[in-house]
Image (cartoon, rainbow, N blue to C red):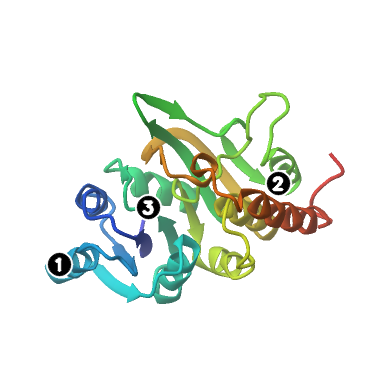
Amino acid sequence: MEQGLLSIIVPVYNSRHDLARCVESILAQTYSNLEIILVDDGSTDNSGSLCDNYAREDTRVKAIHKANGGQQDARSAGIAAAKGEWIGFVDSDDWIEADMYEHLYQTAEGHQVDMVTCGFFLEGNYTTIQMDTVPQGKYEDQGMYELRDKAIYNLAEHSSGLKASLCYKLFRKELIQGVQCRIPDEITMAEDKMCLLTALLKCRSVYVFHKPFYHYRIRANSMVNSGSEEYLLKVYAVYKYLKELYADALFTKD
């Protein structure tokens, strides 16, 4: 199979202690036709210099520097610079298995889908394996209605049907490019879930892959754990966007 170019976007903000493990896990991929876009989102440590060092050492790496605007803004900058047919995301304090993108790309091309999602290792005090709670396989036509209905919560499994993060997924560029620009600036929590739900309205087919390839670190400073006084305002912004999304005819009554 001819290898298409994959663009892997890594938002970087004050990640000097974790960046090496992250980037080196991407450079070590068995799938070699990659461009790795490191987006320095206004870091105040030496993360920006580390990004430049990687760009000098490997022609597959490109470093972008911008004023701090948050993860969504950094991802958008990466997408704008991407030349690949497919887009993947890795957070700068996470890392991936060496064969992750080979598996995701072969699955995407082999099944001719717009998005592939896989399982992940949740890294905290101990490691657990997490996966989507819908059956593994290809979803298209009527199956997409089922997938959309279970995306937020799968009642039968008492769990989210599709895990939220964009990081253990691979998207056709035109899909994620159109989705990313739709998310309102006021959405500053649950951004990944809103992107995912919006993508499900736009894509024709999805392949759900249960095997874990991504190592996702639990963030102690996440919005839910931070006790922010603005938390309820952020929840309300998400609620308003969800109401708009669920008015779409592609979501069933259920």
120 displayed left or right of 245: left
Q: Secondary structure at mark 1?
A: helix
* Residue depicted at 63% across the width and 34% down the height: 160
* Residue depicted at 43% across the width and 44% down the height: 221
Q: Which disc, if any, is residue 167? A: none
135 displayed left or right of 107: right
Amino acid, disc 2: Met
Q: Which disc, if any, is residue 144? A: 2
60 displayed left or right of 104: left
User: For mark 1, does the 10 Å Cα neighbourhood hold few (<14), some (14 to 19), or many (20 or more) residues?
Assistant: few
What is the C-alpha distance between the residues marked 2 and 3?
A: 26 Å
Residue position for label 1: 53
Nearer to the camera, 39 or 98: 39
Q: Which disc, if any, is residue 90? A: 3
The vertical placement of 114 against 162, above or below, is below
Task: Of the two numbered discs 3 and 1 on the same chain, state the one appearing first in sequence.
Answer: 1
Residue 96 picture location, percent across and down = 31, 43
